[in-house]
Image (cartoon, rainbow, N blue to C red):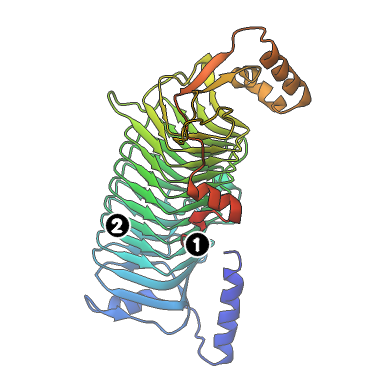
Amino acid sequence: MRNILRALAILVLGLAATGLAQAVQPLQPLIDATPHGGTLSPDPGVYSGPVVISKPITLIGNRNVVIDNGGVGTNVVIETDGATIDGLVLINSGQLHHTIDSGVHIRGDYNIVKNCLMENVLFGIDLQQSNRNVVKNNRITSLRDETGMRGDSVRLWYSMHNKILDNVMTDARDMVVWYSESNRIAGNYLARGRYGIHFMYSRYNLVEENRFVDNSIGAYLMFSDGVEFRKNYIAKSNGPSGIGIGFKEASSIKVDDNEILGNAVGISIDVSPYQPDTVNSIRGNRIAFNAVGVAIINDWHGNEFERNDFKGNFTQVMVGGGGGALRHLWNDNYWDVYQGFDEDGDGRGDAPFELYSYADRLWMDVIPAAFFRGSPILELVDFLERLAPFSEPKLLVHEKGPRIKRSNALREMLASGEPPATKARN
């Protein structure tokens, strides 16, 4: 969205040429004059902010009403229930993190923010203790600064039953869902950030049909329970902390039917599930072309891996601390490194799939050694270990009767070069 400001300049020049442009004027008096439940459609042009909406009105911009805050504060503050803003262009918010300078603050329930463009705003849309709002089809880009100094694209804080739908969020810091439950996040495109989405102390949220591309971490769930993460496309999360999906003390999580492709680590699991007698289910995913398919930080238990396709990962599974992954359930998965046969034709391997660690135990346990992963010398050591082990190799995974064929979705993706989830809105 770096071209928005250029487009705005062209818009304003065009308006001036047609005689429609007006001197920059505040929008607040027009809002104050709009009756309760009324609709305001300002003339095209550039207006000064900030704007406070304290009654249920509809403000329509049709993408040619610009609110320029001049680098101070938040452009639009909604302090009511039942208001709608539609098609505004919001630029140049303030740059203060402690006041959460944003394109939009939502401080109420049943509000709608849709079809807006937000460029050069610190935070995009901030919801605090606000419920049952809809944030739909907006385009949000943060300040031109290093990633850690940007604001979040969308931020939910103690906010419930909201819908975050079909937005394009690029070049921001994170999208965060903290202390919030029962929200639906669907159809969004999140790219070139730190965390595509970051959950903290949140439960019962649904994340589906989103695309997370080129973030440091696609999605991370910390101290959160009951989150469903399905039919998402998570790709190219790379760098020192590159993770497609990560769990940290997260319980009762469902990760179903996602494409997790080309990340440094596809799925990272740290002390999860955390709550007693809970299970995390990881089913029907394509975990492919990652440096590490699944990284389990310690010898833990309680995760169920079923009907997943493991294809083209440099390392399928790694376990830190010298442990294994035998206390997790492995069932009906496809492993491209499986070397068994299916003589009875039932679609399952006749011999179990067993994954051992040999010399790769070096870089799993000694982090600096990971720099040499894939190097000729470490590959030679690994070959010798497999040929005539100097010590007993560690069994990481044991699966009885693994699936012999890849799923149809993965076969189609590999044949076409087009991941199925790219059909989601972008």
Residue at (49% x, 60% y) in the render: 423
Does residue 329 appear left or right of residue 131 in this picture?
A: right
The residue that disc 2 covers is 107
Where's the N terminus, which quadrant?
Answer: bottom right
Q: As rendered, which of 74 and 357 lies closer to the eye?
A: 357
In the displayed structure, would residue 267 be above or below residue 57?
Answer: above
Q: Position of residue 110 (x, y in %)?
A: 25, 62
The quarter of the displayed image where residue 57 is located = bottom left
- For mark 2, give the secondary structure: loop
Extreme residue in the right direction: 376
Q: Nearer the viewer, mark 2 or mark 1?
A: 1
Q: Position of residue 4 (x, y in %)?
A: 57, 69
In the displayed structure, would residue 353 be above or below residue 425?
Answer: above
In the image, what residue type sits under mark 2?
Answer: Arg
Q: Position of residue 201 (x, y in %)?
A: 33, 37
Q: As rendered, which of 95 and 358 lies closer to the eye?
A: 358
The circle drawn on residue 426 is 1
Extreme residue in the top direction: 391
Q: Is residue 9 visible?
A: yes
Residue at (57% x, 56% y) in the render: 418
Residue at (63% x, 18% y) in the render: 366
Does residue 377 appear left or right of residue 178 in this picture?
A: right
Q: As rendered, which of 399 and 361 lies closer to the eye?
A: 399
